[in-house]
């Protein structure tokens, strides 16, 4: 209780005097999750966060992968991390001190994961306190970048979520793990427990290779959609730009010349309720010719 | 070489993947939300039954059905035709 008072005191001090919390919408908490590792959760969190912020939203990106911090690298702010998520929870610093402001996109902030090996560093109460403070600070979106697996970090990343972006590769183990995650979203979240309509789930396919889909080597969007029974919020084509983006610490959505960037931009639009047809599901024409000759 | 030709005539690997996933996902969904004690319950029941009848481990099925307002725990044990030694 005492802590809450101190935190909201700070929030009031920083907020414009005429801001009354009830007047604005609560910040929307979106978990980016998958179950399986290496499918593109962090890449997706970074790009969706950038995309939302570019559209004028105040966005906080939180890395829940305690002990294996990586969102900072993908965002290119690894050398600016002074305080982390666990420091905020433990009261070693204020939230404001720990939030890293992105230098490229106005309104975008990163909260780095701690590199501690203590598995109990994150607590439900602590996470809730940070999320409440972000809310009272006027953030529109809080994106929770979940660690792989179904352990504590993954649980806490999804627990408070209003929506979930389930990142999946069109590949058997990823699809199966995603289904497992969907089961957890439907039972082990605050919204599920409160009977609050549950967490709204979206599917985002990454590493999609239209050529391999066309030749029957890879499951199609519709195959995955049919198995998991979810709305598709984005299909990101397999692209060399994704590795280039992580190499340079610039979220791929900021690469104007990339199909992957366009695909993420569309996903951001759909997150905001726009009706957009899926793109990049078909192989490009020149690819088709190459395939004819290549056999 | 013969094997390769055989492989080519098979359905696409994507459709194999889809079919396998359809089955495993349906199976895993059916046990989702069931109490954690079910597998242990099944194992212990099997041990008790095994003291009297030599049953196949697969012959004991435990199902939990949820209907409006109540849950039904259904146990089915397929006994062998003749009792084994």
Image (cartoon, coloured by chain):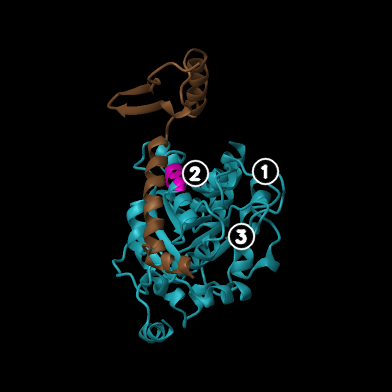
Chain colours: A cyan, B brown
C-alpha separation, residue under disc 2 versus residue under disc 3: 21 Å
Depth check, mark 2 against mark 3: the one in front is 2
User: What range is drawn magenta here?
Assistant: A180-185
Is residue A250 toward the left or the right of residue A139 in the image? right
Q: Residues within 10 Å of mark 1 (few under 14, many from 20)?
A: few
First-in-chain label (2 vs 3): 3
Select label 1 or label 2 by which is in front. Answer: 1
Where disc 2 sits, the SS reads helix
The first of marks 1 and 2 along the sequence is: 1
Which residue is the site of mark 1? A119
**Residue with the mark numbered 2:** A159
Question: Chain letter of disc 1?
Answer: A
Q: Mark 3 points at which residue?
A: A99
Residue A121 at x, y = what percent? 67, 44
Front one among A237 and A80: A237
Which tag is nearer the camera, tag 1 or tag 3?
Answer: 1
The quadrant the N terminus of chain A occupies is top right
Badge 3: residue crowd in 10 Å (few <14, some 14–19, many ≥20): many
Task: Say whether residue A181 is magenta.
Answer: yes
């Amino acid at each position: 209780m005492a802590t809450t008072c101190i935190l909201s005191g700070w929030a009031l001090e920083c907020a414009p005097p005429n801001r009354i919390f009830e007047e604005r919408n609560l910040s929307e908490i979106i978990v980016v999750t998958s179950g399986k590792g290496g499918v593109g959760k962090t890449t997706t969190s970074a790009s969706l966060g950038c995309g939302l912020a570019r559209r004028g939203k105040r966005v906080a990106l939180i890395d829940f992968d305690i002990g294996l911090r990586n969102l900072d690298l993908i965002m290119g702010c690894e050398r600016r991390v002074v305080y982390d998520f666990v420091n905020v929870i433990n009261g070693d610093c204020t939230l404001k001190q720990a939030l890293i402001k992105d230098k490229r996109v106005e309104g975008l902030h990163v909260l780095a994961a701690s590199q501690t090996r203590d598995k109990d560093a994150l607590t439900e109460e602590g996470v809730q306190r940070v999320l409440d403070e972000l809310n009272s600070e006027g953030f529109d979106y809080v994106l929770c970048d979940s660690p792989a697996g179904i352990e504590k970090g993954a649980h806490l990343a999804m627990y408070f979520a209003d929506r979930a972006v389930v990142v999946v590769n069109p590949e058997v183990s990823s699809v199966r793990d995603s289904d497992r995650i969907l089961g957890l979203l439907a039972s082990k979240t605050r919204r599920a427990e409160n009977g609050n309509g549950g967490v709204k789930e979206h599917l985002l396919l990454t590493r999609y290779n239209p050529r391999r889909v066309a030749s029957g080597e890879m499951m199609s969007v519709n195959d995955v959609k049919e198995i998991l029974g979810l709305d598709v919020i984005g299909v990101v084509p397999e692209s060399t730009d994704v590795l280039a983006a992580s190499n340079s610490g610039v979220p791929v959505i900021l690469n104007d010349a990339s199909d992957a960037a366009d695909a993420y931009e569309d996903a951001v639009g759909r997150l905001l309720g726009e009706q957009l047809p899926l793109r990049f599901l078909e192989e490009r024409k020149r690819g088709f010719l190459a395939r004819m000759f290549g056999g | 070489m013969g094997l390769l030709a055989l492989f080519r005539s098979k359905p696409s690997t994507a459709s194999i993947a889809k079919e396998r996933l359809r089955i495993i996902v349906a199976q895993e969904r059916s046990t989702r939300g069931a109490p954690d004690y079910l597998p242990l319950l099944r194992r212990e029941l099997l041990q008790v039954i095994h003291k009297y009848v030599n049953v196949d481990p697969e012959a004991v099925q435990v199902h939990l059905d949820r209907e409006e307002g109540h849950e039904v725990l259904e146990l089915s044990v397929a006994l062998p035709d003749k009792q084994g030694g």
